[in-house]
Amino acid sequence: MADLRLAFRGWVRSGTYAAVPAGTLTDGRLTGRVELTLREQEAGEVAVEPVEFDLLGPGDAVSLRPGAVTRTMPAPGTLDFETTKSAYVELRAADLPWRYTPERASGERLRPWLVLVTARPGAGEASLQSGGTVTLTGSALAAHDLSRSARWAHVQEDADSPRPQLARLLSPRPLEAQTEYLAVLVPAFTPDGLPSWTVGTPSVTLPAHHWWTFRTAEEGDFPTLASRLHAGPADPTLGRAALGYPPVPAAEELSVRGALCPIGATDAPVDDPVADDVEQLTTPLTDPRRPVVGMPAYGDAWVADPSDTTWGVTFRRDPRHRAVGGLGLAMGIDEQDQLADAAAAQAGALAAAAQRIRFLVTGLSAARGLWGRRLPADPVHRLAVLGPALGRLMTPAGVVLDRATADDRPLPPSLFSTAARRVLRPGPNRVAGAAPGAANPAAVLEAANRCPPLPDRGPKGSLHADDLAGRAGIEPLDDLLRAGGADPEERAKRLKELVERFDRSPYSDSTVEHFDQVMAQWVERAAQGQPLPLEQLLAILDPPGKPPDEEQLQLMLRGLRGEVREQPLTDAGKGLVTRPPRRPCRPVDLDRFAVDVAAAFDPTADRPFVVDRVLSLITGLDDQPLTPPELCPDLDIPAWQMLRDHAKDWLLPGAQQMDDDSVVAVETNPAFVDAFLLGLNTQTLGELRFRNIPVVAGCTPLRQFWARADTATGTYLDDIVGVHAWPVGSGLGTTAHQTPAASSADLVVVFRTPLFRRYPTTVVYLTAAPLVGGEPDWDGDPDLSARLLPAFQGSVTPDIVFFGFDLDPALGAGHWVVLEEPPQGFQFFNATTGPDGEPIPGVDAGPFHGATDGGAFADAAFADPYRVMIRGDALIAGG
């Protein structure tokens, strides 16, 4: 139980059972005894009397409440449960398995009153009856010896879990492979407290408190299957296929590397007689009278003469790569319907896109003809003509019309409507009586773009403060208050007059003395030109209502001694100044606005706005000119799957000769990938054009072979770039043909084992062995958190699977290959040996068989998650 903080206990139940003196039963119930003490408080008399009581027994439990069983292992209906693991149920109440047991505990040993039985209905071991009962027969009963049932129940304690305690009932029966089982929860005791059956009981019918069915898989479990893995021999023929060339009988037999091939392997040169014969066969024949059908010219769909390229010459003289190209061509024929359907699905919107482009081109042509002849030359007049379209002209900040006619703009939205255009259109009935130029749209826009004048300072016929000031021969009060800052001596004099006129009679001597001190300070500050707290001073010296009482005056004076808000003397009057109304108004720069709007509509520009607008609605077109669009379908179809489905021997030649449970290391063959995809794309392009699916010239629709996963986007990465981008002087399999994700050969680990068929979610990864003196230290603990996960994976057959890693194959000798058992919840072994008699890895037979209570048995039978590590140097030749 590494890294798990679990503890198992044999039983748990109420402390009431501690009052049971012996294991005597009364009608199947344990009898408890306690001494009851009665004490009379006043007289001090005490009476002690033993009292006996019965505890509920198995006969009192009729059924389980809904929800009492919280989990079953395996889940109901499972079809591939492991034969070496125990079926079990988990119960919500931790004490439920022992709550009605008619026995006392002996240390950690206590038999439960409920047991889980697994029986084979097909063998006649169990049958469910009406009324919620089940009949169990001899072999099922014999496999569940109730004298050992204390081992089958335990309490699991886990402080890190939301449920710190849970009860579990195991079935101890070893399971047979590919067999249907009924798991049923039945009482282990009769109502009178006796065992429900013994080893020799032929059959018994019991209440079925809970039941479900499941089926087992074939023999073995993850530890058993994983422990059988071993490094396979570095067979130099694995990944190679023999290829004869009958036209030249004396030629030596050739060897062709498959898609997966031996690490470090290369292709030997082809004998000249063979190369010359192939070149003669592949040289196109010409006849001026009629066309001649000859051998496929691989590459002519992308370059005018493939023989002018290094990679193209290979297909003219090397039968091995030409055979691989023909293999790809054959896959294109076999999968033509799938490929054509996938391309047609991508081309489904091509007609709609073409229609949009046709409408765009037609509209631009008409608009360019009208733009210079029908639009006014004056920019503002042109703005009026384009005004009705402003409501549909979008910017990142919003609709143009809304911005030009916002609340702080003088232009009304209705001025840009079609109705306004009709009103201002020249005609005798509308503008005949108007002044010359009054209906000019540009003039109307300019007039409407002026902010309204501010109102007069005072309504006509009413007096204003400035009028009174003028009649009195003094400067305007507004200007005086607005200027502020009278002569300091004058301010001090006026403040002193107010202080002297203050009526002191209602106040006590101490208050008057305090008043004089405070006011003397503020008179002195006024004389120095300092700002005054005018509102606070006037509230005392010249209050609008009755003067403050003594308590109020004391508070106001203390306020003047503390932190006060200073205010110039004239600030009080500034509120009387007549201000213009707050009416924000920002005229629009009509000239600039007209130029910007015209630029947005101008069809004569190099790249009119409408072109980007329309093309932005069409995806999948790269730098599309305004011509009927053509498609370069990107078919997201891994080509290796075609090879597996139609010619699996070419995926890994010799794979069928691998030993059972063997593991080998190979590498990808980029030259095979290039040749295969070249043939596949050659056939696919011809088929798409034959089916009238428009394909752009130079397109490479299939660029994936291994289906390399891109975890960031959840898509697959290409293995090759487009064939049109292959350099003239590059050979097959060079990095110039590959994408960065597929650059160079990759390490591939191949397994022949039923493990991945049984456990498809097994985690496989590489981790580097620690280095000592520059060499791998296989005895040191590797950093398992530094994982290199597979870039791709697949299968040749259900039992032959491979995992590809983005790693130089030669570096694989310094890495561990790690397999981790997929998490399946807590599991417990039901035996220490498998059906073949071999010990099950991870089970200690001594504690397993010697445990007498449920806690010890659960600890011994607990199935730790299993991890297998294989040294990389054992998989690579020379390691």
Image (cartoon, helix red, strand yellow):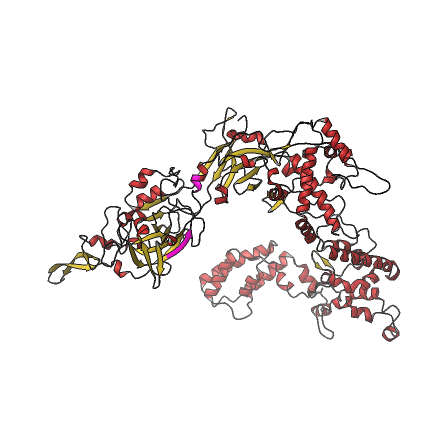
Residue at (74, 56) in percent of width and height? 351
Q: Which of 206 and 674 lies nearest the eye of the viewer?
A: 206
In the rendered structure, the answer to whether residue 48 lies left or right of residue 175 reads: left
The stretch in magenta equals: 211-224
Q: Is residue 218 magenta?
A: yes
Q: Which image quarter: residue 681?
A: top right
Q: Is residue 436 magenta?
A: no
In the rendered structure, the answer to whether residue 212 lies left or right of residue 565 reads: left
Q: Is residue 757 above or below residue 732?
A: below
Q: Which image quarter: residue 360?
A: bottom right
Q: Which image quarter: residue 352?
A: bottom right
Q: Position of residue 707 (x, y in %)?
A: 61, 43
Query: Total label count?
Result: 0
Q: Position of residue 664 (x, y in %)?
A: 53, 33
Q: Which of 281 and 572 lies nearest the eye of the viewer?
A: 281
- Which residue sits furthest top? 773
Q: Is residue 464 above or below residue 180?
A: below
Q: Is residue 524 above or below residue 813?
A: below
Q: Which of 626 and 594 lies nearest the eye of the viewer?
A: 626
Q: Which of 742 and 342 lies nearest the eye of the viewer?
A: 342
Q: Position of residue 139 (x, y in %)?
A: 32, 50
Residue at (36, 40) in percent of width and height? 832
Q: Position of residue 226 (x, y in %)?
A: 45, 38
The quadrant in which the N terminus is found is top left
Residue at (75, 49) in percent of width and height? 689
Q: Residue 377: in sight, yes or no?
A: no
Q: Residue 413: in sight, yes or no?
A: yes
